[in-house]
Structures are given as structure tokens and as C-alpha cells.
Amino acid sequence: MVTITEIAAQKVKEMQKVKKKGTAFLRIHLLNEGCSGPNFGMTLEELITEDDMIYEEYGISIIADIGLATALEGAIVDYSESNDGGGFEIRKEIIGHASGCGGSCGNCGESC
């Protein structure tokens, strides 16, 4: 199961509003499989497929391909601010591995 922090959910809602995609899902997808585990990406997407699983928390619907169920088990979507800006990350504290979403996460255009 994937969870999202309250601050990350708030930031997703802000992006939905800015991008005029108020009903969009937050899709998690696999970017690559590295030596330290999977690296995930995120996009706002308006369509869901029959191969998607869906998680809902804080009014945000998170979708991912069913094939990622094991890789995402225990994952947390979070958002943090820093002096260099802010960004989303997906981390799995259960196994002590953190996976950032890569790229410029602060603006989360078509990918973040």
C-alpha cells in the first residue's frame, strides 16, 4: 500500500488547481531499476486503466500499475522544502531505501 503525507497531498492539490486538472490522479511509475532498488516517477494523469490499482488518502487518488504492487508496498509519497526549493520524493522506510522522483520535482509538470 502507498501512503501520502498531508503536506504532499496539499502540494498535489495545489498542482491540480494550477494545471486545471482538479480531478487528476497522481500516477506513480517506474523510472528504472538501479543497484539500490527501484526509482519512481510521478505525473498527474486524468485516465485510469483496468491494470491500475488505486489508493486514496487526504483527498488524493494515487494510481499505479498493478505490476508495481510489490515494489510500492510500504512506500510513502512526501514533499519537503529546502533552500534550493522543494520537491516530492517516494521513500520506503521499511527497507531503509529512499527513492527520489528525479528531475525537477518542485513544479511537477508532465513528470516530476
Image: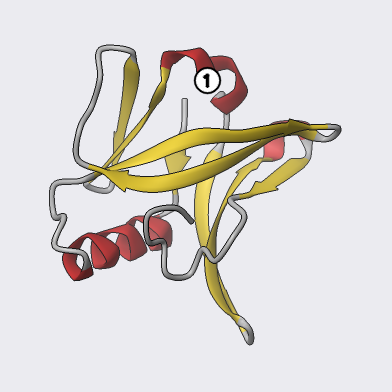
Name the spot of residue 13 as percent of width and height, x first. 25, 60
**In the image, is 110 to the left or to the right of 33?**
left
Note whether 93 is above or below 101 in the view shown. above
What residue lies at 50% left-to-right and 47% top-to-bottom? 77
What residue lies at 61% left-to-right and 23% top-to-bottom? 71
Name the spot of residue 42 as percent of width and height, x first. 45, 46
Q: Nearer the viewer, residue 9 or 42?
A: 42
Note whether 1 is above or below 108 in the view shown. above
Crowd class of label 1 (few under 14; some 14 to 19; many from 20; radius 10 Å): some
Figure quadrant of residue 16:
bottom left
Taking the view exactly as shown, the residue that stands out farthest to the bottom is: 83
Model colouring = secondary structure
Note whether 33 is above or below 102 in the view shown. above
Badge 1 amino acid: Leu
What residue lies at 54% left-to-right and 66% top-to-bottom? 104
What residue lies at 42% left-to-right and 21% top-to-bottom? 65
**In the image, is 42 to the left or to the right of 74?**
left
Name the spot of residue 76 as percent of width and height, x first. 53, 42
Q: Secondary structure at mark 1?
A: helix
Q: Nearer the viewer, residue 71 or 9?
A: 71
Figure quadrant of residue 38:
top right
The residue to which callout 1 is attached is 68
